[in-house]
Amino acid sequence: MSRPEISAEALHEVDRVFARQQATGAAPSAAWGVFDGSGVVHWGAAGALKSGATPGPATAYRIASCTKSFTAAAILILRDEGKLKLDDPVSSHVPGFSAVALPTADSPEVTLRMLLTMSAGFPTDDPWADRQESMTPAEFDTLLSAGLSFDSVPGTSFAYSNLGYALLGRVIESASGMGYREFVRERLLEPLGLYGTAFEAGHYHGEGAAQGARNLDGEWDYLPFSGPGAFSPIGGLFSTVTDLSRWAAWLASAFDADARAESPEPAGVEHAAAEHVVAEHAGTKHAEVLSRASRREMQQAQRIVLERSEHPMGYGLGLFVEHYENQGPVVSHSGGYPGCSAHMRWSTELGVGVVAFENATFSRVPLAAVEAFDGLLTSLRSSRQGDLLARAWPETRLAQAEVTALLRNWSDETARTLFTPNVELDMPFPQRREALAAALRAIGGLTEGAPRDEKSSAPSQLSWTVPGRLGGLRAHIQLTPELPPRVQSLRVETVAPAAGPMLR
């Protein structure tokens, strides 16, 4: 995938969006970044930390539920190593779950896949779960032994469940023989060089971590950090603009056209000693942390999310997936804990995205992040189309040339060689010839100019305009899944300034 050029104006607009958010008094401080496949390409900050210092790209904020993507990745590592299957019953890894009574006599067993995709049937639980970070393992066992409530039959619908991801943390411990936090640190954070990402506030010196706050009578009331515990898998991580951007860019790199593409080597900006650590891990190949195939799997919608959204939305494995019309899939996750708000969002096709943090309860930084990202994506629309055109099959380009020649000089014999039989069955060639002649009259005939306004939505599809004296002919072709592929569809219409017959 070619790396799109992000204009200075687009970056300025990102800054303006977050500056407006800060001006509303939403939080004491904010930090944000724009990234591509190389990592952070632009960052900004506003407001002040508790000490009065300005945050920077190495300032850690609580990322809350963005942690779920790390938990899901850990599960897939264990799946890929053969230590578990996604359709395993939860009770096979968490014996205490066997005591949980299911909602109906015919309910299926709750599986790891159901937990990952938020379809286990548990009620949505943000307000309660956000305060359970420090729950001990013994308290978690007591919670399970007392039984759980269900909103729906397991496996039938989506409901955002933190409890499900807390259970996945237990699964990771059971399958790996390691503590959850230890596993994430050793198998994800360290190999990827995310040295500014940690579960413990004590990992950061001084005000290396932004302390969260709530607004009480117009004053910021700073809150203590909750400690790690049984609910850390739902949202316990702290991270930085630099690190979360690198994490998101690594996930997005799974869609790079170059199968050898890997994320950049650790930048080491968070700590003075990072260069030594980077050198120590220089032999680690990022692709070995989690395969491209498994990372792509995380970013596929598995469950429809029936929430009010401008775009169709689903939940994958630890990540939300939206489809932007004309701009492709967008992956994201928000995070909210008492005293913090976070968001990460990227285009899988462009590998470009935004991360943002604020340190206040109910600050809703995701709204600003979505606005900033949407503006950025709009500015890069031509880059996306250029990448799609570059991915067109050679056979698609050859068919374009042959169809263009056919429009200039129609031959039934040539058409039968070029098209699959259904093309003539769908519209007999005499009718196609008649419609083409009428279209050519409407535009005063074709000129010798090169095709223009090319567009593609897939390597097997292409649209272009053949110029005419009074407008042009817009041609659309679609190739078959055969090898070699053939043209299975041709649609032609006149374009401005004339409008006329269409050939299908």
Image (tube, rainbow, N blue to C red):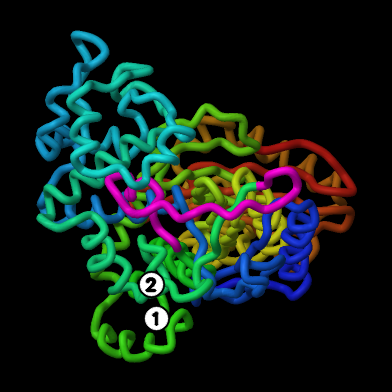
User: In whole angstroms, how far apart are the C-alphas of marks 1 and 2?
Assistant: 7 Å
Q: Secondary structure at mark 1?
A: loop
Q: Which mark is residue 266?
A: 1
At horizontal 44% and vertical 48% (from top left) the residue drawn is 65
**Is residue 222 on the magenta stretch?**
yes
Residue 73, quarter of the rendered image: bottom left
**What residue is shown with label 2?**
194
For the residue pair 135 and 329, the one nearer the viewer reads as 135
Q: Position of residue 246 (x, y in %)?
A: 45, 70
Q: Earlier in the sequence, mark 1 or mark 2?
A: 2
Disc 2 residue type (three-letter): Leu
**Above/below status of 38 relative to 275:** above
Relative to 52, 303 lies left or right: left
Count the labels in the image: 2
Q: Which mark is residue 459?
A: none
Residue 184 drawn above or below residue 51: above
Pointers 1 and 2 in contact (C-beta within 8 Å): yes
Say left or right for 81 vs 56. Answer: left
Query: Magenta segment range?
Result: 215-238
Quadrant assignment for the C terminus:
top right
From the top left corner, tell me how far across and down residue 186 is, in percent: 23, 68
Task: Indicate the amino acid at tag 1.
Answer: Pro
